[in-house]
Amino acid sequence: MTFPLIHSKGNQALGSSKIDLPSASTGMYQLSIRLKSGHNLAIRDRGGTSDPYVKIKLAGKEVFRSKIIHKNLNPIWNEDTSLLIENIVEPLYIKVFDYDFGFQDDFMGSTYLDLTKLELKRSTEVTLNLKDPSCPVQILGHLLMTVTLIHRESDPRDTNMFRRRNLTPSCKVQNAHLLEAHKKDQLWRGIVSVTLIEGQNLKPMDPNGFSDPYVKFRMGCQKYKSKTILKTLNPQWREQFDFLLTDEKGDILDITVWDKDTMKKDDFIGRCHIDLSGLSKEHTHKMDLALSEGKGHIVFLVTLTASAPVSISDLSVSALDNEEERHKIMEKYSWLNSFYNLKDIGFIQVKIIKAEGLMVADVTGSSDPFCVIELSNDRLQTHTVHRSLNPEWNKVFTFNIKDIHSILEVSVYDEDRDRRADFLGKVAIPLLSIQNGDEKAYVLKNKNLTGATKGVIYLEMDVIFNVIKASIRTITPKEQKYIEEEQKISKELLQKNYYRVRRCIMVLVNAGRFINSCFEWESPQRSLTAFLIYLVIVWNFELFMIPLMILILMVYNYFLIRSGQDSRISSMEELEESLIAYEEEEEDRSDKDAERKGLMDKLFAIQEVCIAVQTGLDEVASIYERIKNTFNWTVPFLTWLAVFVLTAGTLILYFVPLRYILLVYGIHKFTKKLRNPLLIDNNELLDFLSRVHSDVQVVQFHELHQESSQSLMIFKKKTG
């Protein structure tokens, strides 16, 4: 990506007046921006005009948004903003959008501003050419702004000034008690994480026999409200909320359920409460509570996590560091206990040690990071380290493993006093890929796990599990994750899934062409060889040869990978690049504040169809990719399990007549429901394949190295 030419007021090029970069580490920079106007902007509306506004991003985070100028291709903004910048090597990313009421805003062009080419303490008038990254030759108009860059040493007074400036009076009044709790860290006793899952058999409050339920939470001065689910008595919310547990009397979480009404006051459906004092910490509790003063049940997950007052020395003492405790755990999951408590697969210990070089999330030039650790539906959280880009937590977490194919997710957030926590980075680690006892630095990724973001996190993990229990668990249904991101319509995701399916179909098409070429004798030598092989196999065919041939293919691929001829790396890199476009589109998605209820009702049916097609394409592509990755030894544990099953199947089919096998299988299938009426029927093969990683998951769970992460970030900027 080439940066635009920058001119000063005196028409003197500034390319020769670059800032001395080594001095960047001695303090902060203040960048003052005056967004003046735009000229000859792109037409995006039917009337031949646009409604433009400007977004400015720094280090992937939006730091400024201008007002909307309606129906004007030469808008005049004359808006001012001031930013504190830690690293001026990071360019300023500027995008222009056309505002569309009720629809996604249209892209009008983007550009970069190279801060290293600015002169210090000098007001510089900048003309920026707007371009579309997909067609960089075409210019979509110009932006005119004045920028001034000032270098300043770190001063605590600046920190306080910017903090006060970014807290509006309304926020101060509304969150006064909560802010006070944030300021007094020593009064925290922990963090209460509440996951609202669903409601069951709620009371109908509307004439149509349904309700539009939502839930209100209150603990002391802290309040939350869930989303509204329309026209249902069995709503599925799957939302998560965090509360601060202080030394004040606030151990009771009060929960009320309401029916949303547009023309009158909302109707009360029912109430329940949770006494937090009786719950154990560092453990996830599933609760099904009946509503008093009403009808129905509400299902929750509640987790209490110890916070900052716990000393680091206590946290550093782990169960596996004690030889006696380690021996007891090893014995618990030994081969001798393989058929005792089949649901308890194993044990994992995670040490969250520290992070380095995190993204700046606050205007003060620092962050207030904390970690969230998730394993299936268990969710724990560290304390917050205030005003640090290199936090040290030194906390130990332990989980019982219910499925060895689960993914450990470690997310880093910046705590904000008056709004939702800012995302800083995330890593997803399959349990089977963990190397016991090794402290490793993991490069943090973005929300979609498709590329690197700023910073690394240091983890040390130990996994102990029983292989037989894990193998049995593999062919049973996966545990449903209660809180997941809501599905959205995305053109980029739909296109990505389409290309994935097309790639799968092309493999079958190419295989068909190869077989047809043998029939057509395009290559006599190849056709003759195929003909002789076909005659030999058909003449000597036995049923045991089917799993034997699959077994031979797996062994062949195994030795191919061991010899260094691994084709998985190139395909994974190709998929990484294709996912970056989807990530860019998700970053630019913003919610509209205007009322769109009527319009969304009209588009609701279309949205459901699009989401179904989008999800269906993903499922079809994933099945092929999981089968392929089973043969490619992507998850060695699962492939070894397949090798064992295929070997056993080959021997059984060789020595046991087929009629006896079919007889046993038929008796088993016909009597399964009689033997256990409550048994949930399942397909063992599909359950096995659901544990194998698809190509997208291989990219998401791939561990980044610092060198490769920097190159990915450069590629992402160029394609932006």
Image: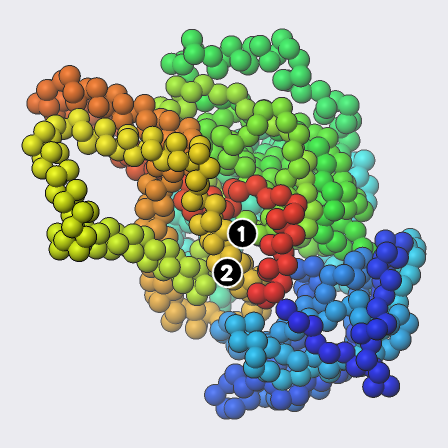
List x then y, in percent, for residue 143.
69, 81
Identify the residue at horizontal 45%, vertical 22% (top origin): 345
Height in image: 590 above or below 106?
A: above
List x then y, in percent, for residue 194.
57, 40
Disc nearer the start of the sequence (2/1): 1
Numbered badge on residue 334: none
Tags 2 and 1 in contact by the CB under 8 Å rule? yes
Front-lying residue, 89 or 685: 89
Picture quarter with the C terminus: bottom right
Q: Is residue 531 left or right of residue 443?
A: left
Task: Assign a secondary structure to mark 2.
Answer: helix
- Which residue appears farthest toward the bottom when viewing the image? 47
As shown in the figure, which amino acid type bears the numbered disc 2? Answer: Tyr
| Disc 2 from disc 1: Cα separation | 9 Å
Can residue 670 be seen?
Answer: no
- Dot 2 surroundings within 10 Å: few (below 14), some, or many (20 or more)? some
Q: Is residue 705 left or right of residue 693?
A: right
Q: Is residue 353 left or right of residue 676?
A: right
Residue 673 lies in what quarter of the image?
top left
List x then y, in percent, for residue 468.
39, 19
Task: Assign a secondary structure to mark 1.
Answer: loop
Identify the residue at horizontal 34%, vertical 30% (top origin): 555
Q: Is residue 635 left or right of residue 555?
A: right
Identify the residue at horizontal 38%, vertical 64% (top origin): 607
Numbered badge on residue 450: 1
Q: Which residue is mark 2?
A: 582
